Image (spheres, rainbow, N blue to C red):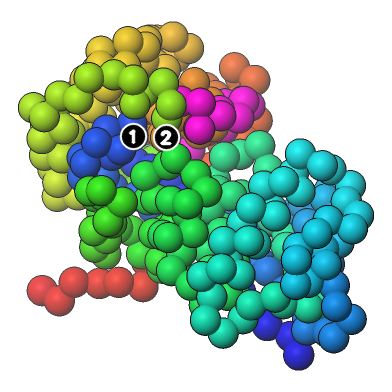
Amino acid sequence: MLKSFHSNGKLLISGEYLVLDGALSLALPCKYGQSLNFTEDSNGTLEWISKDMNDTIWFTAYFEAKTLQVLKTSNYNTVKWVKKILEFCNKNSLKNKNLQGKIECKLEFPNNWGLGSSSTLLNNLASLFEINPYDLHFSTTNGSGYDIACAGSNSALTYQVSQNIPDVNKVDWSPIFREEILFIFLKKKQKSNLEVKRFKELKKDPDLINRISSITKEIIHSKTIEEFEYLLDEHEAITGQYIQSETIKSKCFSDYEGSVKSLGAWGGDFVLATRKNKKYFLDKGFDTVLSYPEIIKESTFKTIS
């Protein structure tokens, strides 16, 4: 018996870092994600295979089905994390404990893009074991959980979390200026867990949280590219000052005519740029420059006017 699941990657447009303290954020699910196929068997073992976007196997493991004892693996560091996840799934699943057979995962984007290789996996496993994906997320990672919201969404959404309780709302965000938006990969994967740990050492600022939440709402209702850029620039300035980091535009793209905003953890992964000047970024050596329609999942949610 074959069971198949799919989860979307994600990009966080607003609220990075401060979403951890309860700020309202805007997030977009991506066209690229991760699939998971489970083939049931009765051989007493659970085989795990992970493939990259080119179908190349990069991780394998064999577990004893009931105890999850590792029988064989290609990477002992990775298998520790996978075993921890499977143990949580077994403990909390009411129906699908101690699965026997083969789990095969396949990414649809390069692993270093930072679009959610972990969150898409967790969401797929939660579907397979029929457990709450947020419970699985908060038991195994230190992130906000917005990536889990995107993994199962077919539209833009706002995300807010308080005491590990997420508040997720779909929004009809497909701005008329979306053709002027670019997403550029900085050729460097940022370690989100380390950035989250560093951020949590900072003192909370309720006024800052409220302002970022307000900016998120204003972004959703922005009508022109100029209004959108003003809000992005303010968001960057506020966040940079709070986390004591130079903005990505000031650091790398100071002569660019449009706005450039970090997405998610600062210093790597993707940035958003306006004015759609692909040549500028290609000339600087950034060879992954994607338009809005090329990477963002088309929304199936529309408000009734």
Asked if residue 248 is positioned above or below residue 162 in the image, the reply reads: above
Label total for image: 2
- Note whether residue 7 is visible: no
Q: Is residue 190 highlighted in magenta?
A: yes
Residue with the mark numbered 1: 16
Q: Quadrant of the N terminus?
A: bottom right
User: Is 152 part of what is drawn in magenta?
Assistant: no
Residue matched to label 2: 264
Amino acid carrying label 2: it is Gly
Instruction: Classify mark 2: helix, strand or loop.
Output: loop
Residue closest to the eye, 26 or 182: 26
Q: Earlier in the sequence, mark 2 or mark 1?
A: 1
Residue placed at 65% from the left, 30% from the top?
287
Which residue is at a point 54% across and 75% down the rendered structure image? 93
Residue farthest to the front, as pictured: 67
Query: What's the distance in space between the residues labelled 2 and 1, CA to CA?
Result: 5 Å
Asked whether the residues under the numbered discs 2 and 1 touch, taking CB atoms below 8 Å apart as contact, a structural biologist would say yes
Q: Is residue 42 above or below residue 106?
A: below
Describe residue 65's horizontal placement relative to residue 238 as left or right.
right
**Magenta stretch in the rendered image:** 183-195
Locate residue 124, reporting x and y percent.
Answer: 58, 67
